[in-house]
Amino acid sequence: MNLVIEVVDLHKSYGPIRAVDGISFQVEEGEIFGMVGPNGAGKTTTIECVEGLRRPDRGIIRVLGLDPHRQRYEVRQRIGIQLQEASLPRRLKVWEIMDLFSSFYRRHVEWLPLLEQMGLNDKLNAYFESLSGGQKRRLFIALALLNDPEIVFLDELTTGLDPQARRAMWDLVREIRAKGKTVFLTTHYMEEAERLCDRVAIIDRGKIIALDRPENLIRSLGAEQRVVFNTSESVEEKLRQVPGVVRIERIGERVIVYGQGDRLLSELINFLEKARINFWDLRFEQPSLEDVFLALTGREMRD
Amino acid sequence: MRGLLKLTLIGIKLYLREPVAFFFTIIFAPLMLLLFGSVYGNEPNPLFSGRGTVDVMVPAYIGIIIVTVSLLSIPINTASARESGVLRRFQAAPLHPLAYMTSELISNLVVTVLGVLFLILIGRLVYNARFNGNILSVSAAFLLGTFAFFFLGYLIAALAPTARTAEAVGMILGFPMIFFSGASVPWEILPSGVRAFGRYLPLTHLVSLLKGLWFGDPWSQHLHEVAVLLAILLLGGAIGTKLFRWE
């Protein structure tokens, strides 16, 4: 695999605050790499240093083999940036925005199909100020894709979006990756990172505290899985023989089985079927990335 | 290069799309000319060395247009573009700050020139206002004064912590200049106390230079004004570009 981003020992302080405190990681070509953590953890500072928008105090950054600070114009020709907070002149029309930004790049895609893909093709003559929050966000993503970039940076892509729009964004990010591009995103939604990212760096107080595939992070936690179902029969004693089961709780008809191992669910269902136990409303609850985060940081997320 | 051209055209369009800016840059000075022209006419007046009121108002009003663009528009526009994140979005594109500044300067120059041309056109057509100078000399003085004031405007934007401050500072500097420099009320009829104060305003020097050259004075009579404007141009330009920030 080719490395498209390499960061070694990145430091950045704002006055006495160490926003980024010795971060190192690598991003491979074609993956969706996510940086998660609470607000103020250092995600935006990190991504903006990598984009070349901020100058790190210390550390080495290579983007497509280039120095994003010294060779910033070359790097920006080849990457796409969606900023967490940005704006455009309020009386600029959508088509003018696309036409103008196209002229900054050596190479760019046709912007009309891009706007169609973003559902903005009926807004060509609308002023920027008349767009809704979600439309502005989509316009900024269109700008980030305009130069057919090799790496797309998405900072807090879905913050403030409703659930439908959020899922549409996830589909969009997967489409971007399917076209062979690398995606580097930040989010403070653990669920988003878990569902979307190939690899996730958990960042807190300016340091990476874990970095792996989401499923590996969850497995490494060794947390208990839960199988919950309803039955009217008395099953507790029998279930203790099932491999992987650790403990059982019963509340009326509801049975909660705590256990470990990849085969817990299938072993349990097999057992219930073989024993001809009548059960309903069965569901399986796995620990999530949020559990990993809370286990690692030992406190609630600050929002 | 293509980007620079597009950005400049967009800058002009954006400026003219703001109704208030459009009014004060393009309409206001010609309107004043028509208003005061209808009151005083353009008969030769000994107060203005035998020239008419409209004759002397045309070059003086150029000063109003320059202040409108440079001190009333540029500080607030630049500082709010920075504050709202517009500049950051441009920064994220492969756009050099110098290219951005250049397009800003050119588009603001173009709207200033549009206002001035409209003013001259009205003066010429309605009152047959006189011009006894050399077009090249007057243009050179106009460019010198305009860029000196533009850099003053960008300097305010760069130094002001917020857009509101930039707007306030621009107005506090801009409005007294419009009234006490001879740009709106002719210098010849200002009370001596006001003149004593007005002498310290940069616009007084610009209006004096423009009026002088407009009626055929040689440059040698206005070296003091040229020196003041040149100093503002160089200092403002040097500090303004040094302090430029995207956010």
Image: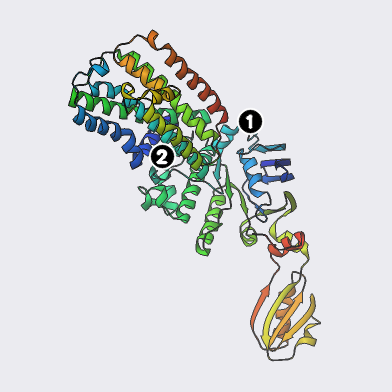
Task: Measure the alpha-carbon separation of dots 2 and 1.
Answer: 28 Å
- Name the residue tied to disc 1: A70
Q: Position of residue A123 (x, y in %)?
A: 37, 51
Nearest the eye: A182 or B41: B41
Give the amino acid type for the residue marked by disc 2 in the picture.
Answer: Asp
Write the residue at 34% across / 26% down.
Answer: B183
Q: Specify the quadrant of the image occupied by residue B175.
A: top left
Residue B202's place in the image compared with A222, above or below, is above
Dot 2: few (<14), some (14–19), or many (≥20) neighbours within 10 Å? some
Whether residue B86 is visible, yes or no, is no
**Does label 2 or label 1 sit earlier along the sequence?**
1
Nearest the eye: B151 or A104: B151
Q: Position of residue A57 (x, y in %)?
A: 71, 37
The chain carrying label 2 is A
Write the residue at 70% across / 80% down.
Answer: A269
- Dot label at residue A99: 2
Dot 2 and dot 1 within a common chain: yes
Secondary structure under the numbered disc 1 in the rendered image? loop
Write the residue at 49% across / 22% down.
Answer: B232
Secondary structure under the numbered disc 2 in the rendered image? helix
Is residue A109 toward the left or the right of residue B188 in the image?
Answer: right
Is residue B167 toward the left or the right of residue A30 in the image?
Answer: left
Q: Position of residue A59 (x, y in %)?
A: 73, 37
Is residue B35 toward the left or the right of residue A197 in the image?
Answer: left
Q: Position of residue B163 (x, y in %)?
A: 50, 41
Assign the N terminus of chain A to one quadrant of the image: top right
